[in-house]
Image: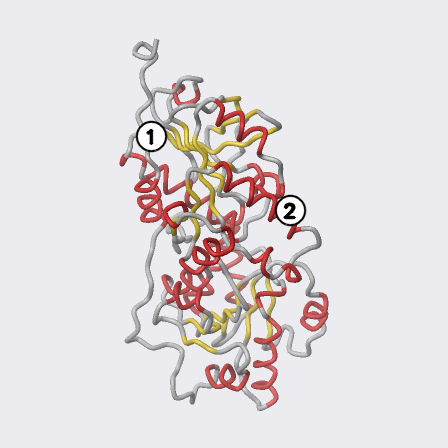
Amino acid sequence: MPVTAATDLSEACFSDTPAVPRLLFDVTRLLESGLHTGIQRVVRRLIAAAQRQRHLTGCAVLAVTFQRDQWFALQYLAPHPLEGIEAEAQPDVQPIFPGTGDHIMMFDASWYCDPWPAVDAARSRGAKIYGMVHDLLPLERSTWFRDGLQQRFSEHLQLLVARAEMIFVPSETVRQRLLHKRKLLESFVQVLAHGGDFYSPGCQQQPSLDTVRQLASTIRGSFYCALGTLEPRKNHAFVLDAFEQLWSQGSPAQLVVVGNRGWRVNELLMRLDAHPQLGHKLFVFSDLDDIAVHWLLRRAEALLYMSNDEGFGLPVLEAAMAGCAVICSDIPVLRETGGDWPHYVRLDDLPALVDALTPTSNEPPRNETRVAPWRTWDQVAQTLYGYVALERVADAATST
């Protein structure tokens, strides 16, 4: 059974009148999209951790999907190929009817779907809804995203807030923005910060090992790693500007860019594809699995994360927990996520970034006196259980 499986689940967990409370994590968009980036990685890890920690409450943890007003449960959530875990076929779903004692976690990117008929049907039977707002950037910086997302996201947020028992956010930065924008009660919005452990020791499969060998044979010497989808807010062009200045001065510094090609960055993509240093001092990879990413972070001089804005900044925590130095943009949310571990650089200060990448810098990025932030997904699951009131489900005999 894969690491992400919800194991040891009895048939009673799937019944219409379950004997234990259930945490039901929506994965409709996750399975639909086939993606394995920020939100999908978060949802998968949290489901697995909630399953491992369910002894705290005695609840059942299931991945579920919706179609119109119907819910379906999975015996387990098969690993994504990019988790670097042994492949497992996704099992068939079976209908369930969430009701009293059920807590539906709407943490997936469900604004791309229409969950409300299924959500309302579950609420009418007594189920409770909890939501996760990963960030508000589609509302605040719509030009960074595809056309139409702002309206779609806004409508989804409004409907979610109207139905949820509680809204979770990954950072206090997002919490304050949401409270200000929607005029919500402070107790209604709570911080559920992400974990950073995506590497599973002992789970490496041959494809992952082959990828690592390829990386090791391709990248020679020291390098810096820029991690994140190639899209406007990640600010890869700023990083490339800094390295081009270094290369013009004869620097041997190497830049490894890791991220799938996103949207509205055609100029950046053309610049990367035609770059004279491509394959020499510049390397670009997409679709690397979690094992390969961890391998890079363990060996990089530093993670470069010069994002314009974030809801959390997951790579900063992931890199810190891998022991990798971090050079990142000096914005509030990354200071919240990274603490005193990163070397912070203002987004309008290219000379400061070049200086941070120069070995003779007065403040090198790898400072052993700094304390790396640390938060595992098991700890996140424990926090989640502390917020969600899991009432016991009455036996059928006592409820009739």
Which-is-in-front pick, marks 2 and 1? Answer: 2
Under circle 1, the secondary element is loop
Quarter in which the N terminus is drawn: top left
Q: Are marks 2 and 1 in contact (CB under 8 Å)?
A: no
Q: Residues within 10 Å of mark 1 (few under 14, many from 20)?
A: many
Nearer to me, 345 or 120: 120
Above-or-below relation of 39 to 4: below
> Residue at coordinates 67% horizontally, 71% vertically from top-left?
272
- On screen, residue 322 versus residue 86, left or right, reads left
- On screen, residue 6 versus residue 304, left or right, reads left
**Image location of residue 338, percent across then percent down:** 38, 66
For disc 2, the marked residue is 152
- On screen, residue 142 versus residue 358, left or right, reads right
Quarter in which the C terminus is drawn: top left
Under circle 2, the secondary element is helix
Q: Residues within 10 Å of mark 2 (few under 14, many from 20)?
A: some
Nearer to me, 328 or 103: 103
Q: Earlier in the sequence, mark 2 or mark 1?
A: 1
Mark 2 to mark 1: distance in Å?
A: 34 Å
For disc 1, the marked residue is 59
**Image location of residue 106, percent across then percent down:** 49, 39
The quarter holding residue 254 reads bottom right
Nearer to me, 275 or 131: 131
Kind of residue indicated by mark 1: Cys
Please tell me the numbered disc located at residue 11. none
